[in-house]
Amino acid sequence: MTLYTFKPNDFKVFEVDGLDARMEALNEHIRPQLQELGEYFSQFLETETGEVFYPHVAKHARRSVNPPKDTWVAFATNKRGYKMQPHFQIGLFRDQLFVMYGVMHEAKDKEEQVKVFEEQLDYLTSLPEDYCLSLDHMKPEKKYIKDLSTEDIQSAIDRVKNVKKGELFVARTLDPNDYRLKKDQAFLYFLEDTFKHLLRFFK
């Protein structure tokens, strides 16, 4: 019995047709783990930073027709919400589990918030080779940092400053069949290791 991790079949909830049916499947197969991860990593982040973090499990409450293509738990120091400030996420698309930290397009003062990636550019480019950038949290596509030039990264940062919909997350992903998803211990180790890397960008 596992508390935190996801089985390959859990990812198949994103194949369920219809909003109500998919939400029911999400609530049964995904949400319990997200809530457990929320409890675990809000404590972990508080221990690491000395600041209080609040977990925000996606509710998808505004949806009336289209079923969600992904779901997540976000971590922020704001109890009321997370979108307005840089934040951490653990979530799933059909073909990946993702962990990430960054600035959403709705963030307050995002032009200032994204500067941390410029200030930490050397560290960003020295991250292990499985780290990537997400330029749109609503899409599964991500680009490995090792495949990007300094100019590519700077362009992504500048886009956050200059484009209303611009956003940037540093991310790490797992395939649904990855061995690290088979046991809680291996999964938590992967997540903790990832968060420790991402915490360098947290102010």
Image: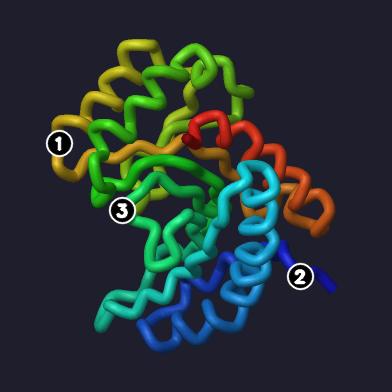
- Image check: 80 left or right of 200? left
Residue drawn at (64%, 51%), measured in percent from left and top?
Answer: 46
Badge 1 amino acid: Val
Residue drawn at (57%, 75%), measured in percent from left and top?
Answer: 31
Q: CA distance from mark 1 to mark 3?
A: 16 Å
Residue 140 or residue 193, whichever sits in front: 193
Q: CA distance from mark 1 to mark 2?
A: 40 Å
Badge 3 amino acid: Met
Residue 203 or residue 193, whichever sits in front: 203
Dividing the image into 4 quarters, which one contains the N terminus? bottom right
Disc 1 target residue: 163
Residue drawn at (50%, 52%), measured in percent from left and top?
Answer: 89
Marks 1 and 2: CB-CB under 8 Å?
Answer: no
Disc 3 target residue: 84
Q: Is residue 187 above or below residue 70?
A: above
| Furthest-front residue in this view | 50
In x, y percent, where is residue 62? Answer: 27, 78
Badge 2 amino acid: Leu
